[in-house]
């Protein structure tokens, strides 16, 4: 049997030997995007991993609590097992996305048991989403996760600000939301949050919104979002950690590219590939066809939208250069 993780190329070896925290720091400093694709259904794992390998793009496979509760990702254990069948650590790592303290339906979540389970299983990074509780409480829960995760060398993503869209019912009109900056991450709160929690990556709200996950809205095309780049610059100047954009589907390309040049390192993409998968399955009843739809959408995003084909090679050479600075 072929060992998928034995490096056949020199640059693959560099990535295999570098931990995710360091890869993300180099990506942040060099303005290279690491896309993160959500697994809404278990058979999506295979095309996600294989497309990253095919395009020599370094990216994350991720699963959130909503992917498990509202769609067909089943469980953290099931995603982990499926991921292990295909993983190639030169191109991918497994991230636990959104485990909220209070969920999109206003219910208290037993976030500890989910996050501790992911850590025990061997997920490569985890997110705690305390954005629906007070800043003080958000800091407290995030500190607790950071303590557990850092003891195992696992990086943690936290969130400050409100990335709307997962909640039931209509959003305020987008234009109003964008121009008023409602829910935007406050730079001073972000600074305090990063300082006091020592979180590794920060998820922010700067005009990005999540694709809907309930009712008929979850099947509709997501609206085109924009980003306030000046606001992003303010946040980055006082936090200096890799920034994460949730709600990656349908953000206007020029804003996305500008955001990457200004500190956004990870973008979460859920709706775009979930809807393609569901449509393929609805139209043909065939999982292979639905998987092919995911591949096609990912190729478009990686090659044409984010323009990051070959990013694994680039990252590896930058990692190497930093390890051997020219005197
Ligand atoms: P979209 O569904 O809008 O792409 O957002 C995905 C996401 O942010 C998952 O955390």
Image: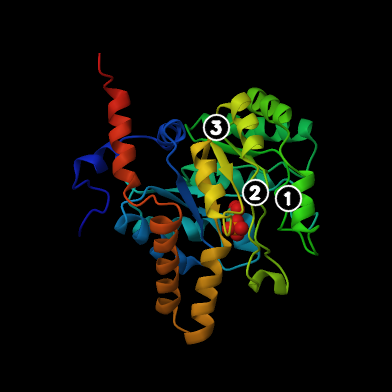
Image point 64% across, 31% down: which residue? 235
Image point 42% across, 60% down: which residue? 48
- Classify mark 2: residues with Cα within 10 Å, few (<14), some (14-19) or many (20+): many
Place residue 304 in its image quadrant: bottom left
On the question of residue 182 being in view, the answer is no
Picture disc at residue 99? 2
The residue indicated by pointer 1 is: 109
Mark 2 or mark 1: name the one nearer the start of the chain.
Answer: 2
On the question of residue 162 being in view, the answer is yes
| Image quarter where ligand 1 lies | bottom right
Task: State which mark lies toward you, 2 or 3.
Answer: 3
Colour scheme in the image? rainbow
- Residue 71 is left or right of residue 54, and the answer is right
Alpha-carbon distance for marks 2 and 1? 8 Å
Alpha-carbon distance for marks 2 and 3? 16 Å
Alpha-carbon distance for marks 3 and 1? 23 Å
Quarter placement of the C terminus:
top left
Residue 144 image point, x, y percent? 65, 32
Task: State which mark lies toward you, 2 or 1.
Answer: 2
Quarter placement of the N terminus:
bottom left
- Kindly check if marks 2 and 3 are in contact, taking CB atoms under 8 A apart as contact: no
- Kindly check if marks 2 and 1 are in contact, taking CB atoms under 8 A apart as contact: yes
- Residue 88 is left or right of residue 202, and the answer is left
Relative depth, front residue between 156 and 29: 29
Place residue 21 in its image quadrant: top left
Picture disc at residue 225? none
Q: Secondary structure at mark 1?
A: loop
Q: Secondary structure at mark 3?
A: loop
Residue 307 image point, x, y percent? 40, 52
Relative depth, front residue between 179 and 144: 179
Q: Disc 3 beta carbon < 8 A from ligand 1? A: no
The residue indicated by pointer 3 is: 200
């Amino acid at each position: 049997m072929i060992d998928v993780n034995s490096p056949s190329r020199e640059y693959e070896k560099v990535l295999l030997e570098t931990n995710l925290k360091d890869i993300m720091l180099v990506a942040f400093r060099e303005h290279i995007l690491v896309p993160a694709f959500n697994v809404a259904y278990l058979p999506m794992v295979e095309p996600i991993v294989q497309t990253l390998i095919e395009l020599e793009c370094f990216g994350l496979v991720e699963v959130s609590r909503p992917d498990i509760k509202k769609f067909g990702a089943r469980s953290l254990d099931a995603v982990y097992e499926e991921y292990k069948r295909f993983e190639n650590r030169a191109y991918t790592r497994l991230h636990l996305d959104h485990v909220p303290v209070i969920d999109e339906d206003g219910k208290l979540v037993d976030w500890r048991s989910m996050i501790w389970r992911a850590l025990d299983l061997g997920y490569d990074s985890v997110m705690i989403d305390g954005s629906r509780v007070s800043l003080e409480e958000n800091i407290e829960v995030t500190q607790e996760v950071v303590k557990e995760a850092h003891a195992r060398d696992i990086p943690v993503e936290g969130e400050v600000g409100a990335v709307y869209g997962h909640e039931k019912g209509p959003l305020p009109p987008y234009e109003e939301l964008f121009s008023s900056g409602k829910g935007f991450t406050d730079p001073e709160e972000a600074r305090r949050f990063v300082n006091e929690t020592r979180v590794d990556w920060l998820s922010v709200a700067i005009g990005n919104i999540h694709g809907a996950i309930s009712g008929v809205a979850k099947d509709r095309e997501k609206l085109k979002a924009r980003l306030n780049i000046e606001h992003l610059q303010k946040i980055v100047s006082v936090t200096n950690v890799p920034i994460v954009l949730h709600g990656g589907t349908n953000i206007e390309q020029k804003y996305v590219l500008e955001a990457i040049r200004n500190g956004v390192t990870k973008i979460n993409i859920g709706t775009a590939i979930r809807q393609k998968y569901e449509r393929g399955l609805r139209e043909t009843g065939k999982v292979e066809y639905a998987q092919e739809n995911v591949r096609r959408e990912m190729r478009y995003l990686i090659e044409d939208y984010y323009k990051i084909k070959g990013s694994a090679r680039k990252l590896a050479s930058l990692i190497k250069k930093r390890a051997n600075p020219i005197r």
